[in-house]
Amino acid sequence: MKYVDEFRDPQLIANVSREIARLAGAGRHYRIMEVCGGHTHAIYRHGLKNLLPPNVELIHGPGCPVCVLPMGRVDDGLSIAQQRDVIMTAFGDMMRVPGTRGTPLEHKARGVDIRMVYSPLDALRIAQSTPEKHVVFFAIGFETTAPSTALTLARARALGIKNFSVFCNHVTIVPAIRAILDSPDMRLDAFVGPGHVSTVTGCRPYEFIARDYGKPVVISGFEPLDILESILMILRQLRSGEARVENQYRRIVPWEGNLPALQAIGEAFELRPYFEWRGLGFISQSALKVSSAFAAWDAEVQFEVPGIRVTDPKAAQCGEVLKGVLKPPQCKLFGKECNPEHPVGALMVSSEGACAAYYRYVHLSESVPA
Amino acid sequence: METVERDVPRVRFNDAQIEMAHGAGGKASRRLVEGLFVPLLANPILATLSDSALSDFKGSKLATTADGYVVKPLRFPGGSIGELAVNGTVNDLAVAGAVRPLGLMASFILEAGLPGEALRAEVEAMADAAARAGVSIVGGDTKVVEHGFADGMYIATFGFGEVDARANLGPKRIREGDRVLLSGPIGDHGITILLARGELDLEADLASDTRSVAPFVEALLDAIAEDLHWMRDPTRGGVATALNELVAATELGITLFEEAIPLRDEVRGACEILGLDPLHIANEGQILAVVSADSVDGALGAMRSVAGGEHAVCIGEVRAKPARAVLAVTAYGGSRLIDMLVGDPLPRIC
């Protein structure tokens, strides 16, 4: 398959792994955070950990939108879904995320009209075909998915579709990275930057990481060779004492980002003063709300939203795992009370969550030679 | 029949309500079967949890199986609900060693308002599939429910057949060093159905692989009967779930060679886009077989001689470690644990 197979070439992968091992040498430990959940997933799926020397440690960051969504927001969304004549629509990623009284899938089984869609435009189509109902799109995601929600809002307005609104939970990645960098227990050496988010934002928003915190950032693709090459580029910077933003994913990510997509986001959304992130707490200016110009399509304006706040179960140590202080199996609940079928902490919910990925792909195989 | 004392089940079913996941063939389905049905209906035949129930009958072994079909849409590229109902039932019997079924029965649950022509088309599809499989549909039942209570039609089937005397199959027969064989590319059925629902703006030149797998089984029995240790058609839950169920019944593990697993580009592409693991996607015309190491060539030769089995391959090996787990190794030396399906396969979009 073009654009896939050439990045899974065993010979090239072996060469890069060897070069990583040579460059990493011994005596120093490297802690590299992959910010993006897609990278976490790819790292496990391709067993990349086995291809790295033990002193190059990958730490899974906050880049899974499902994982960082606080439980109270899920409850808020489900409370809208339970109102009369409402059809709630959501991505597959959302369907297994637990609120305090169950997941969207469990609510659906009880008769609440919740439908999985593949794009916000599908939700808008449902609104067009069922004018007697109000269709709400439960929007989640970073800058990767925000443009499609923004364009859907623009289309709803242009077509004058009144029975459609967005429950906006879009978040932005840069404030989360800054929160991690400012955390007192921060001990990372570098970042594998998010690939999909950067197709929209470009590379510039990460420059402060190199400039102000002295940490290298390499924007990476999602194939095994992409990720390994990015780690190699990071090691080269660290070895030479440099800290720059580099773009390994040049075939997709423009340095300046995608201007029309950024413009669409700018028109449809405005920054919230603060937003709660599961595991990381409140982070200022880290999330988007539907802008006042689109208030008629903002579910938070159209519906009474209880604004439920739910503290995470005390024993779940999602925050420490997100910041790289703990590895998933070091959490007290990992694999016991908290497992992919019955997630307690957010990181166990999505297959991109560090704990779910760890549980699924590693917890047994890690100790077994291939 | 000997009865078994009801004892504390290994798996408990405490789920508050039934969800779609309980029918998806993964962990929740297993919890339902092992935590509710098996302990409450306790008997030694049920306890084996095979695709077919095996009972001794006048000196031979009788295989019986029941299945229900609730697919949407009713017709899809490569097949339809009627064809699936016959093939699926024939296949459950075949992988138990009953390659020439004695008969099938079909129970139809029809929704008021279903066009007569749609029902005729499905009965015709069943007749054709039965003729191809060399089996008669000898009885059945019809019920009609009010409009809105079924997706057009559901079909429940029952099948029975005599197990070939040469077949000696079961998890207890697998040994360290045995090989895992697969009859052809995986995921065609599940991805075809996903695309046929029309919810995705994706198109692929893909058809369901629904067919009888009895010819594979017969060819294997002819070639290597004594060395054929276990078989399964990996339907809901896919290859991952079928192999996890196998190792759960043993003290052994399975290591898969990921690059050896055949996969059409269309299936791979759809899985890449949707974030699905092809090992979890349903198949309707493939079999997994575990055979002794020295009979691999004979077994592959036999499978490849059957139409549709040209791409049969060895995809893995039974190993002592990791016990009770399925591991996949990549072409470049990485490894990952292959779990059973959790819930329904949900596309990752974010």
Image (spheres, coloured by chain):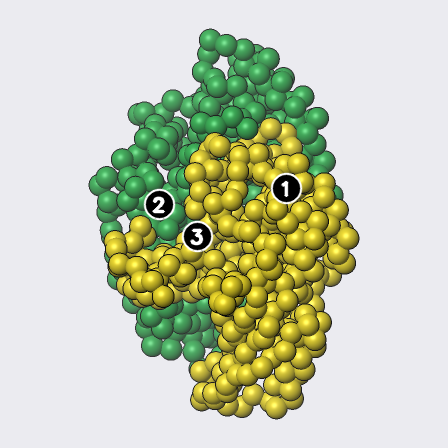
Give the amino acid type for the residue marked by disc 1 in the picture. Ile
Residue in the image at 51% along x and 64% along y: B59
x, y (%) of residue B66? 49, 70
x, y (%) of residue A368? 48, 28
Would you say residue A196 is visible in this rendering? Answer: yes
B292 is higher (above) or lower (below) than B14: above
Q: Chain of mark 2?
A: A
Q: Nearer the viewer, residue B13 or A97?
A: B13
A145 is higher (above) or lower (below) than A192: below
Chain the render paints yellow: B
Answer few, some or many: residues within 10 Å of disc 2's Cα (few below 14, many 20 plus, some between 14 and 19).
some
Question: What's the distance in space between the residues labelled 2 and 1, CA to CA?
Answer: 29 Å
Q: Are marks 3 and 1 in contact (CB under 8 Å)?
A: no
Please identify the quadrant where the C terminus of chain A is shown: top right
Q: Chain of mark 1?
A: B
Which residue is identified by label 2? A339
Q: Nearer the viewer, residue B74 or A173?
A: B74
What label does residue B342 carry, if any? Answer: 3
Picture quadrant of residue A320? top left
Residue in the image at 54% along x and 78% along y: B105
Which residue is identified by label 1? B315
Answer few, some or many: residues within 10 Å of disc 3's Cα (few below 14, many 20 plus, some between 14 and 19).
many
Answer few, some or many: residues within 10 Å of disc 1's Cα (few below 14, many 20 plus, some between 14 and 19).
many
Query: Does label 1 lie on the same chain as label 2?
Result: no
